[in-house]
Image (spheres, grey):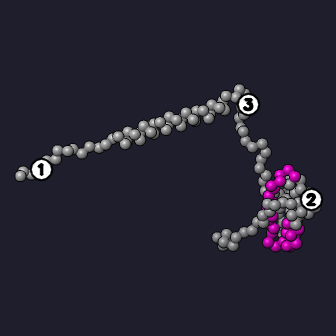
Amino acid sequence: MPLKVQRDDQTAINLTPMIDIVFLLIIFFMVSSHFTNQATSAERDIAISVPQVSDAGALTAPPRHRVINIFDDGRIALDKDIVNVSELESRLADAKAQYDQLGVVVRGDGACQYEKVAAVIATCKKVKIRNLNIAVQNEDSLRR
């Protein structure tokens, strides 16, 4: 009995599943592009004339942190103006009335009396400032 050395069947790649997937992707993209056009055209259907501006930024600037410096001789400075405790309270109250989320940074000299720092912190609490920070310097930064 003779043995067959050659194969009669040739291996073929079946392209039917790949063609099905390509058609499904084409249908998906056609339908999704149709939905996108409907969503943007609904806004354009209203017949109004919208004004144009050059810069549409925020109406008010965000509040900046106010800096209170306490010097070694006991002087208190709000930003760069020397004030006493009563003036500090009135200025902070005015600033708090303008910006409810006002932030304050207290910077006390290392040689100043702790009583002055405590008076400034108590004044800030009296004005009801919630964003209160105390500036310190790390020992690691001093060693460098």
Closest to the camera, between mark 3 and mark 1, is: 1
Query: Which residue sits at x=71%, y=38%?
Result: 55
Measured Cα–Cα span from mark 1 to mark 2: 107 Å
**Circle 2: element type:** helix
Label 1 amino acid?
Val
Secondary structure of the residue carrying numbered label 1: loop
8 relative to 133 in the view: left or right: left
Quadrant (top left/top right/bottom left/bottom right) for the C terminus: bottom right
- Res. 143 in view: yes
On whether residue 108 falls in the magenta region, the answer is: yes
Disc 2 residue type?
Glu
Residue at image coords 72%, 30%: 50
Task: Say which residue label 3 marks.
Answer: 51
Q: Is residue 60 magenta?
A: no
Q: Which residue is mark 2?
A: 87
Tell me if mark 3 has few (under 14), some (14-19) or many (20+) residues whose alpha carbon lies within 10 angstroms of its own: few
